[in-house]
Amino acid sequence: MPPVVESSLAVKADFPIFARRFGGRELIYLDSGATSQKPQAVIDAQAEHLRSHNANVHRGVYALAQEADAAYDGARRKVAAFVGGRPQTTIFTKNVTEAINLVAYSWGRANVGPGDAVLITQMEHHANLVPWQVLCRERSAELRYLEVDERGELSLEALERELARGDVKLVAFAHVSNVLGTINPVAEMTARIRAAGALSLVDGAQAVPQMPVDLQALGADFYGWTGHKALGPTGIGVLHGREELLERMEPFLTGGDMIASVDLQSVSWNELPYKFEAGTPPIAEAVGLGVAVDYLSALGMEQVRTHERSLTAYMLERLGEVPGLRVVGPPEAERRGGLVSFTVEGIHPHDVAELANRGGVCIRAGHHCAQPLMRCLGVGATARASVGVYNDAADIDALVDALQAGREVFGL
Amino acid sequence: MDDLYRDYILEHYKRPHNFGELDPHDLEGLEHNPLCGDELGVHIRVKDGRIEDLRFHGHGCAISQASASIASEELKGMDLDDVGKLDADWMIELLGIPVSATRRKCALLNLKAVRGAVTGDNAWPS
């Protein structure tokens, strides 16, 4: 008997996209790791902002501009509070990729040089790999990788060994791997990194949408995440940074809004967080993200985590029934976020996704922007099913049925 | 019957024709599908301006592997000048199945590698 799904949030009705039909069939969406669907409240909030409160921020004296200011700053306060951060150290970016690039450019170019090392892990998404590779190449520094073991996990001892070499300036790693699903021991890692005198940057893109995140408890120097995976709009990401670091850093992008005053040959920077928000920011998107975190808070992040963990346990159990299916990453749902990557013997992952689509099920196939990890795993690609607050056990059943039917198509 | 995964497509996928490497060879091409990490390489032996023999290698989905396998039979003996004139329609028609926009890249990966090897034009089919 498959495990009973402890908690189903039963919120599908809040997400209007599930009213759509594809060839008469319901939408079975198991690709939330790529982007989440949006609740009606978020869609309405963005539309309402554009309809009734739209003006540029930080410049207008008229009532409408003040409404826009209040909406934008209010969204920042909500987003900061959602993860236990402070508004002045919560910077809105385009996405988590831009958040990481901000640190790699503003902090990295000033603090990493020849003889230094940046340490990342084999499980990083390209967003948390390429910016460091480019930095290290440019600054003649060394980029080193923490290995992923056969369970898909990192080793704290290996981290300590790397830090003991004394040249590591920064360690960047995912909170939750977008391929393996592994939940990394962030607090244990940041404590060791801090003790070694290095900085830490955590990519929280897969974590913030599905588990309680408390920046104080995690202890990272920089923590980035993205709105669109957390029920919010695309075009907005978040970087939280330690205040004294952000104060000392030069801006990443320059232009309007991020200045205090400009002379012909000189400029002084605006205060935090505006120093890092050049140009007109994503205002309506911030409003939408503010409502998205309200929605998640109302569900309760502990309940969201319970929901995702039990669905993941159910998914692991049921996928195990498919002959030839191999799951990558930790075998226990407790050590995973809400996603499972897998291969099916005799069927290429692209075909697995195509066959799932025959059953109306949306899953992703490919290298998931983690080509070095794919090489470690010895596969060119995997299929990946990932869950959100709106999924239920029936969605997983539909995936398993589609995979079983797909095996028959392939004569397996 | 399945529209995409017809029996002959799956047959070519499971038992591809002309799969492997060819040493020595005169021409070679290698292409990646950046979306999925698939990789397809070709080795070509030339005699009198024609493809005397050819092998393809790498890994990919049923569509890309079947395309390469089916095309390999047609390409053998073909004049190099004619290879340079082959277009996407030739490959899709030869494949004989409806190919969606996302799977088109899979279907054309082999021809892209072959054309690159023969003409040096790696930009095709942009």
Image: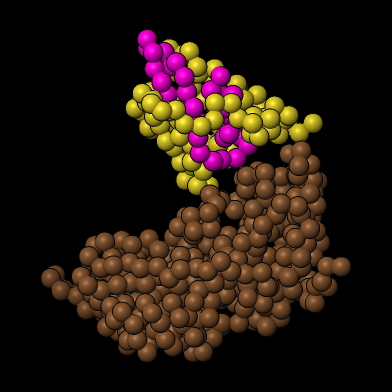
Chain colours: A brown, B yellow
Residue B95 visible, this orientation:
yes
Task: Locate the C terminus of chain A by quadrant.
Answer: top right
The furthest residue to the top? B48
Of residue B38 and residue A105, the one placed in the foreground of this image is: B38
Residue B66 on the magenta segment: yes
Q: Is residue A188 left or right of residue A116?
A: right
Task: Locate the N terminus of chain A by quadrant.
Answer: bottom right
The answer to whether residue B26 is above or below residue A393 is: above
Number of disc labels: 0
Of residue A406 and residue B50, the one placed in the foreground of this image is: B50
Residue A32 image point, x, y percent: 63, 62
Residue B68 on the magenta segment: yes
Chain part drawn in magenta:
B44-73
Q: Is residue A82 left or right of residue A244?
A: right
Q: Residue at x 78, y 76 (%)?
A: A7
Q: Residue at x 38, y 26 (%)?
A: B24
Q: Residue at x 82, y 71 (%)?
A: A3
The furthest residue to the left? A265
Residue A234 image point, x, y percent: 53, 62
Q: Residue at x 54, y 26 (%)?
A: B18
Residue A48 image point, x, y percent: 60, 68
The furthest residue to the front? B23
Q: Is residue A94 left or right of residue A254?
A: right
Residue B91 visible, this orientation:
no
Q: Is residue A118 left or right of residue A124?
A: left
Residue B102 placement: quadrant: top right
